[in-house]
Structure formats: C-alpha cells, structure tokens
Amino acid sequence: MNCLKYGFSHQTRCIKSGLTLTTVSSNQLVNLYSRNGLLQEARKVFDEMPERNVYSWNAVISAYVKFNDLKEALKLFRTVNSRRDVITYNTLLAGFAKTDGCESEAIEMFAEMQRKEEKGIWVDDFTLTTMLKLSAKLTNAFYGEQLHGVMVKTGNDATKFAVSSLIHMYSKCEKFKEVCNVFNGSCVEFIDGVAKNAMIAAYCREGDVERALSMFWRNPELNNTVTWNTLISGHAQNGFEEEALKMAVSMEENGLRWDEHTIASVLNVVSSLKSLKLGKEVHCRVVKNGSYSNKFISSGIIDVYCKCGDMKYAESVYLLYGFSNLYSTSSMVVGYSSQGKMVEARRLFDSLSEKNLVVWNAMFLGYLKSCQPDFVLELAREFIAKESKVTDSLVMVSILGACSLQASIEPGKEIHCHSLRTGFVMDKKLVTAFVDMYSKCGNVEYAAKVFDRSFERDTVMYNAMISGCAHHGHDQKAFQLFENMTEVGLKPDEITFIALLSACRHRGLVLEGEKYFKVMTEVYNISPEVDHYTCMIDLYGKTNRLDKAMELMKGIAQVEEDAVILGAFLNACNLNKNTEHVKEVEEKLLDIDGCNGSRYVHLANSYALCGKWDEMRHIRNRMRGKELGKFYGCSWAYIDNQLHMFKSSDISHLRSEAIYSMLHFVTKDLTEITA
DNA sequence: ATAGGGTTAG
C-alpha cells in the first residue's frame, strides 16, 4: 500500500462493502496518509479503529511528530503508558530533539529511558544516534563523547548510522581530530554516501576545501544532491564564491536539479558578491519553481537586494512573500540598518514579535555607525528590560562604542561591574572596546587595568591602548607598548603608527616622530596615508620646523592632495607666522574642499594674522552667497546623568558665569604650571 | 505486513 490512490480506493471499498479494515491495513493507512501530508485523515482512520496495537499508536504519534505538533504527540504518548515500546520513545525523543526549545525535554526523556531498563525499554542504536544529533545541535562535545562511549560499550558504534552521526557530532563540536579517528577507524562498509557527505562538511568546516574536493571525487557514484550542496556551501563559506557558483552550474550539467538548499547557498554567494544581475536571475528561478515559501530563500533574496543597495526591490519582495517570516524581517532590518536608514530599520524592528540577537545587533551597530549614541543607549535599556541582562559580547561592544562616542563613562562602568560580578569571560573584541571606552571617557588608568588583565592580546587591542596613552600625553608608555607588541610577535599596522605619531605630535617629539615614520615605511612597508602626514605636519608646525613640513608636503604630491593635510599645513604656517604659502594653499584648498565653510574661516584667519586685510575680505566675499555652514566645535559633560553642552563662547548655560570664573582659575593654574 | 535514527541552509 505505497500509493495514496490505492490506499484511498482500498479504504472506500471497505466502507462500501461494510467490511472493517484489519488492524494492519489501518496502520498502513495511517502511515500512508501521514506520509502524504494528510494528518486529519490519518487521525480519522486511527480514531475509527476498533482495535489498536502498539504499531497503531506509534504510527499516529509519528504522524504528529512529523507535523511538529508535539503537544498532541505527547498527549497520545501519555495515553498509552502501558503499551509503549522503545519505538514509541524513540519517535517522541526524535521529535523533541529536532524542535528548538524542546532540547531539555529530549534529555529528560533519554534519562527516563535509561531508568526503565527493567520494564523492557532499552536505549538502542536509534536512541543513541538521535541523541548524538542533539549533541551536535547543542555543540556539546562532552555529552557527545559520553554517548560515543556508550555506543562503543554496547557495540552500537558499528553501523553506517552511527558513523555518520559521530562524524557530524564531532565536526559540529569542532573536534576535528576525533572526526578523523572515527572516519579512519570505521570499516569501509559503514562509510556510505551520508557518511561521505558528513565528512565533506567536516573538511569544509575546517576550512580545508582541497580535501573536501578530493573526497568529493573519490567514489563519485555516491554523490547526490546533498553532496553537491555541501560542497557549494562549503566553498561559499570559505570565501570561494566564484568556485561555488561554478559548481552550482556544473551540478545541473551533471543532471542534478537545484533544490532549496542549493538555491539558498547560491543566494548566499550572490549576496556576498553583491551582484544585482545574478540576484535577479536566481530570483526568477525561485518565482518559476515556487520555492519562495522557504524562509531561507525568501530572506535570502531580500538579503541580496539589501546588499546590492536596492531597497525598493527588497521592500517589494518582502511585501510579496516575506511579510510574515521572521527571517525576512530580520534581513530587512539588517539591510536598512547597514545603510544607515535607521527610521525604517526601527519600524520593522518594532514590528518583530520575536527578536533574535542578529536583529538586536544590527540595530545597535546601525545606530552606532550613524553616530546616534543616544539611541544605542536607549535601545540598551530596552534590551535589558526584555532580556534582564546583557550577556552578549557584541551587544556590549556596541554599548561601549556609544559610551566612547559621547564620553559617558557610567553605562560602560555598569556593564563592566556586571561582567566582573558574573565572571563573564571577555573576548578580545570586548576587552578592546573597554580599553577604548575608558580612554575616550578620560580614564586611561582603568583602560590600562583592563588591558593588563587580558590574557590574550592582538594588534587591535594594542592600538586602542597606545592611542589611549597618546591622547592622555603618556608618550613613554605608548612607546613602551609598541616595544612590547613587537616583542611578542604582533605586527603593527597603519593604525598603530597613527597612534604613535599622534603621541609624538601631542608632546612635540620630533626625533621620535621621524623615527616611527621611518620604521613604518621602511621596516613594515606601510605607505603613509592622510592621518600619518597630518600628524607629521602638525608635529613640525608645533616645533617650528616649517622647512621640514614643506619638504614632507613635496613628497606627498604624488598622492592626492587632501584638504585635511592642507589644513594642517596652513595651521603650521600660522603657528610659525609664515604668510608666504597661504595664497598657494588657498587655491588648492578651496579647489578640493570649497563647500566646507570652516576652510574659508581658517584661511580668513590666516590672512588676518598677517594683516593682509584685502585678501581676508576677498575670502569672506567668496564665502558669502554660497550658503556655507561651519560646523561649530562643541564640548559636553555628563554630570549626574544630565547632559551639559557648550559651544565656543557659549553663555547660554544657566550657570555660565560660575563656569567661566572656574575656567579662569583652571587656566591660570595651568599657565603657571607650564611656565 | 504496519512504527523510530545519520549528511546540506541566516
């Protein structure tokens, strides 16, 4: 009774002729309907059975498990408590194991099975492979190893099911050595297509695409759609996008059709290639074969359009067939937020009934990258209200980034305290974020404490610490850190040298500056960029070495002349009361950055400084009529969670009189110290 | 005769 049509007619014939179906036939019928997606029909046959045996119960429970209705499956399971066998258990166990959020029920049920030995319920090879799959899903190597032990002890490790499950589990748990042990230690008869596929996936997870390929070509008769898909997604995940696409094409040439996994992988590739043309091609296929109901595929298409920056397409695909799909909405949120369209991102974010870490982080990063730290902190409060605490490293990094941006140390401290109290293990990125936050919030001592306590350090972390020292005038400490990092074998990058040069610039250390500039280009082969030049020119300007600054400027000629560099040079001229070059700079500067109001102000000030009033008037006139805005520099402080903001010569603050008299005293003190 | 397990996707 394999075909649905035959099953139907058999059933109707029996009803017409008044015969009752035998229990065996009914069982078959239940199974047939369930296999064909007819749950209600299966249930009806089951309900009308005059007599039921253990097969009947197992068949109907299995039907509910197939349809992810674990509640009903469990209800039936409880009803038959006297006539369960190991298959009843295994059926429900597999249901729990595959369902998100029911993992603990599966573990509980496995424990119950182990306790029931005397009643004729045993843990068998089916049970063990199901549990192995669960360990893989939870990436719990410890649990998986225990199960492996049980398997070996009970002789259940010598089947093809056991071998492929073990390979999969160890690979998911990043125990590649164990994967090889299982694979090499197994009889050839247990290595079938599935085990081969699991092995190819394991190689890909290791990043060893070569080995995956050579395995693919060994015993090619075993290759099926899954094998191809595994190889395609493996290549995509290891950055071999072009190869992945080629493989998808040759898969069809080998007579295998793309299935939903293939399409999802191809969409993934197209999204990282940001190819609108390919994206549309795949989209067409999806429309033709109707596979857009797959959540991976509909969100994949949306993701492609987002990555290509085509939010119109993304939006229309989303409205057509991604509307009620959590994945698609997440893709849209990620898309909008990566383009800085935070209002749109927020609208969809708020519409999500369930928010995973991916969307939360997309929002945090979006607000941070578009320089809206207030929103980051507001969102953080929402996050804490919902999840009760912040345990995700990425979320913390965003919050700390917001603190750095607005120089408010309190939220950062709170997170720090919390992670110290709970013994949270910080990763390198998080430590770096703390170092950066504490230095930017004015407490470089705390930054150094966090830095010193970190077990592992990388170049980025050193960069954060060195710039912290540089900004606080601890030049010797900055230089020392540079020595340390090279001693432990870390390679400094262009950021390291920006930090070092800015330490020199703040302290007017010409010799050291020149030394690091030379080390950077000659030892580390890093070609200087705008920021490096700016530091050096500023350094020369501050130390009255305008000749040196000019020499350096000549060297930059081949590089595109940058407004920031010219501005620094102009500043150097002003500091040295040199007026020769102002005219020359004016032409270049206004040519490059003529729509920036502050450039005109800067130039006008230079002319004023040397009393060239005609030129100054000229500049003022050029500026007028262009409706140019100048960004005012501003400064702010948080006192008792209250923001106080100041512009230049600002008297709008309620207590500005008191503030200015205090400022007067402080400045006086400082002048006396430096004098 | 009829029921349960292994490989690929944000």
Image (cartoon, rainbow, N blue to C red):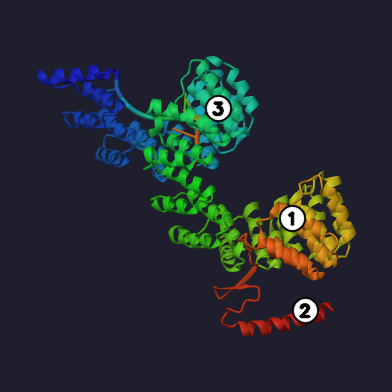
Residue located 57% across and 27% down the image: A244
Q: What residue type is labelled 1?
A: Leu
User: How far from the left and from the top, in percent, is residue A466?
Assistant: 75, 58
Foreground label between 2 and 3 = 2
* Callout 1–callout 2 Cβ contact below 8 Å: no
Q: What element carries label 1?
A: helix
Q: Which residue carries the number 1 mark?
A: A589
Q: Would residue A645 be visible to someone looking at this image?
A: yes
Q: In which quarter of the image is residue A107?
A: top left
Q: Which residue carries the number 2 mark?
A: A670
**Tags 3 and 1 on a common chain:** yes
Quarter occupied by the N terminus of chain A: top left
Q: Considering only vertical position in the picture, is A389 above or below A136? A: below
**Dot 3: chain letter:** A
**Dot 2: chain letter:** A
Residue located 89% across and 62% down the image: A545
Q: Which amino acid does label 3 sit on?
A: Ile
Q: Is mark 2 on a helix, strand or loop?
A: helix
Quarter occupied by the C terminus of chain A: bottom right
Position of A603 with respect to A235 (left or right) is right
